Amino acid sequence: MRASWYEKNGEARDVMQIGDLPTPTAGPGEVRVRLAVSGLNPSDVKSRRSRPLADALCVPNSDGAGRIDQVGPGVDASRIGERVWVWNGQWQRPLGTTAEYIVLPQDQAVLLPDTTEFAAGACLGIPALTAYRAVELLGDIAGKTIVVIGAGSAVAHYAAQLAIIKGARVIGTVGSVEKARHAAAVGVTQTINYKTESVLDRVLELTGGKGADGLIDMDFSTTAALLGKGLVARHGVVSCYGSNVMGETPFPFRDVMFRSITLHFVVVYDLLPADRSRAIETLTHLLAENRLTHTIGAHFALDDIVAAHEAVEGGKVLGNVVIDLQ
């Protein structure tokens, strides 16, 4: 099968290889998916640059979509031909989705509604599942004000939509006029350009000095210092799924504690089975009802995998980056 892989960490143009690898075969309880599209996320890029390899090579990317073309013992043969999206394709295993085929436990191949394109299906495993869990952890948000950090990014774009579906008013931070329009298109009420405005001052202004009832955060290293200053209201809730600084981050413990703020951290690869099942069930219903907007920012061929990685690293693509495999 045609695939892309790397055998050591480094820059994409230095380590990425393209060629043929053995086509895998489905074992007991597994399905083989002939992938149509692979989804490339920032975490895939970070892994290629710095996560030590546990095997001789790594076929990157955890997200993808395609059709089941083979099932192993114990799997209903009626699943052959099923349109599916996959999750955790490259989590703690060497062979991810930048290949024509992937073999996974059958539960990791989820039915994709006929109305949802494969490219959109390749955006669900990390972006949509992360967004769902981050919103869920905020609790009952109907009628409340939620701030979404980086509302133009892939995860936050889904998070904003899911929060709005649950009845929240959403304020989003953005870094450009284009991203402000992108956020507004899915119902974000107000946007704050963090490059030209004080996020704290604007949130206080837009909430009558109260602060947000909830916060969905993609950069804890920046927002941590603002939590005790009123960005989040007393007894507010924070769901965080990332940080630009992965090491130690100064944290205003006393101020946050005396505001009774609740903190949650989301690692999408490690969701509890019940939490993941609930997320998948809800997303499936929303997909079937065409209630989610998907933004595919760029398509690349497998032969252009280096350019795809560099596009994600450059941060200039609005929406998800996908690799077309068929």
Image (cartoon, rainbow, N blue to C red):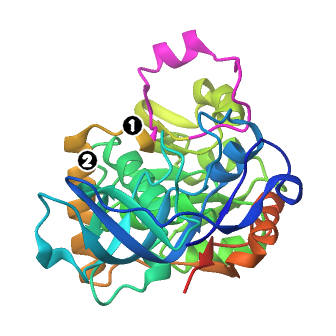
Image position, residue 67 (x, y; %): 34, 79
**Image quadrant for the C terminus?**
bottom right
Image position, residue 180 (x, y; %): 67, 71
Q: Residue furthest top?
A: 254
Helix, strand or loop at label 1? It is helix
Helix, strand or loop at label 2? It is loop
The quadrant where residue 85 appears: bottom left
Pointer 1 residue:
270
Q: Residue at position x 59%, y 66% from top?
A: 98
Q: Between residues 142 and 30, which one lies in front from this camera angle?
A: 30
Determine crowd level at label 2: few under 14, some 14-19, many 20+ residues with C-alpha closer than 10 A. few
Image position, residue 118 (x, y; %): 44, 82
Name the kind of residue labelled 1 in the image.
Asp
Image position, residue 76 (x, y; %): 10, 68
**Image quadrant for the N terminus?**
bottom right
Q: Is residue 249 magenta?
A: yes
Disc 2 or 1, which lies upstream in sequence?
2
Is residue 306 shown left or right of residue 123? right
Label drawn at residue 140: 2
Q: Which residues are magenta?
A: 242-267
Q: Between residues 174 and 325, which one lies in front from this camera angle?
A: 325
Q: Is residue 268 visible?
A: yes
Q: Is residue 35 magenta?
A: no
